[in-house]
Amino acid sequence: MREPGFWWRRPGLVSSLLAPLGLAYGSVAARRMGKRGAIAGIPVICVGNFTLGGTGKTPTALMLVAMLRDLGATPFILTRGYGGTTEGPHCVDPDKDSAAQVGDEALLLARAAPTVVARDRVLGAAFAKAMGASVIVMDDGLQNPSLAKTLTIAVVDGRRGIGNAEVFPAGPLRAPLAAQMARCDALLVVGEIEGARHVISRAGPRPVLHGALVPDEAAVTALRQRPVLAFAGIGDPDKFFATVEACGIQIAQRRAFADHHRFNAEEAAALVMAAEHDALALLTTEKDHARMTGDPALAALAAKAHVLPVTMVVEEKDKLRELVVRALA
């Protein structure tokens, strides 16, 4: 299911009709977020976001893992494993586990650091600590109160911001903004900031950092050789397409799918055939490619699809480092 377009426009008739449901949902979510979480015994750095859909949490988590290692820490990543069937706690093996088992994000994260999938975050944190973690990077979970956080960073898409600022289902917010902001220590605005000015104005004393997703230069150079058929099943496919075009890669065709979309054999064959018919290179995201891993029906698509890796680069790196060092202390 694709997110509705009215979420990202000014409040209108549909959002107004759904506002009472949003009020009820938001009230429950806010009360739940107010609960006191269990203490993990080691620092917990949470990377979350205010809205449903993608904002750049996974690249941010990977960036923090690299920073923590530079500081001499032993980071483990804790994730719910969205889209997978494993309840955990389970330490992900990227060579053996599949996206159907642990989710696409977990597979991607596990290539960079030990990654624990757990529906129960408290059990997952204890599991990671027992395996030798000195700090946990929690991918998502701002709205989950079960585990106390040492540092919480909310990642905001600078282009879309928080949309119409309404709570689900009237808008994209997971809970009222005030309730979520109260549990954040810093904001990381990714990309242009125009769409995020409203949420930035509500940050108060919290530091507002600015980040950018920087594509891998070697991959960009290789992909500039011919036009591509770009496809993505992430929270905001248009963001991926814009990144591709900003690199100077020509998109001849594009296919957008719902977030965490699990491709089937027919879709895979159609993508391969369309690319071959028009002599196009196939291009997708790292998350989409991870979802193809281990599925024989998608082997041909996985083999032919190029990936555009991206890295989160933070403008105020020293300030972020200061926040992380304080969390470790």
Image (tube, rainbow, N blue to C red):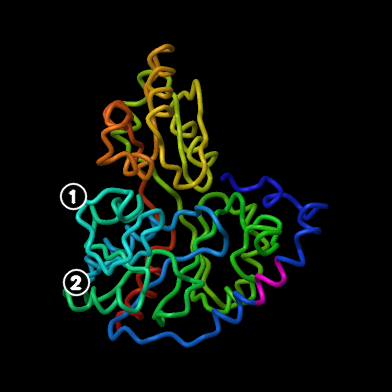
Side (left or right) of 92 relative to 201: left
Residue 229, compared with residue 93, is above or below; it is above
Side (left or right) of 63 relative to 72: right
- x and y percent of residue 191 in the render? 52, 50
Q: Determine which quarter of the picture holds residue 175.
A: bottom right
Going 27% across and 65% down the picture, which residue do you hit?
116
Quarter holding the N terminus is top right
- Residue under circle 1? 96
Kind of residue at badge 1: Lys
Tell me if residue 23 is in the magenta stretch: yes
Q: Using the numbered discs, state the Cα–Cα distance from disc 2 to disc 1 in whole angstroms.
A: 29 Å
Query: Magenta residues?
Result: 22-27
In terms of secondary structure, what is the magenta stretch mainly? helix
Q: Residue furthest right?
A: 13
Residue 261, compared with residue 264, is above or below; it is below
Name the secondary structure under disc 2: loop
Give the mark toward the camera: 2 or 1.
Answer: 1
- Mark 2 neighbour density, 10 Å: few (under 14) some (14–19) many (20 or more): few
- x and y percent of residue 69 in the render? 22, 66
Name the secondary structure under disc 1: loop
Tell me if residue 118 is in the magenta stretch: no
Going 47% across and 74% down the picture, which residue do you hit?
144
Kind of residue at badge 2: Gly
- Residue under circle 2? 72
Q: Determine which quarter of the picture holds residue 128.
A: bottom left
- x and y percent of residue 73 in the render? 21, 72
- Mark 1 neighbour density, 10 Å: few (under 14) some (14–19) many (20 or more): few
Going 23% across and 71% down the picture, which residue do you hit?
71
Say which of 71 and 109 sits in front.
109
- x and y percent of residue 52 in the render? 56, 58
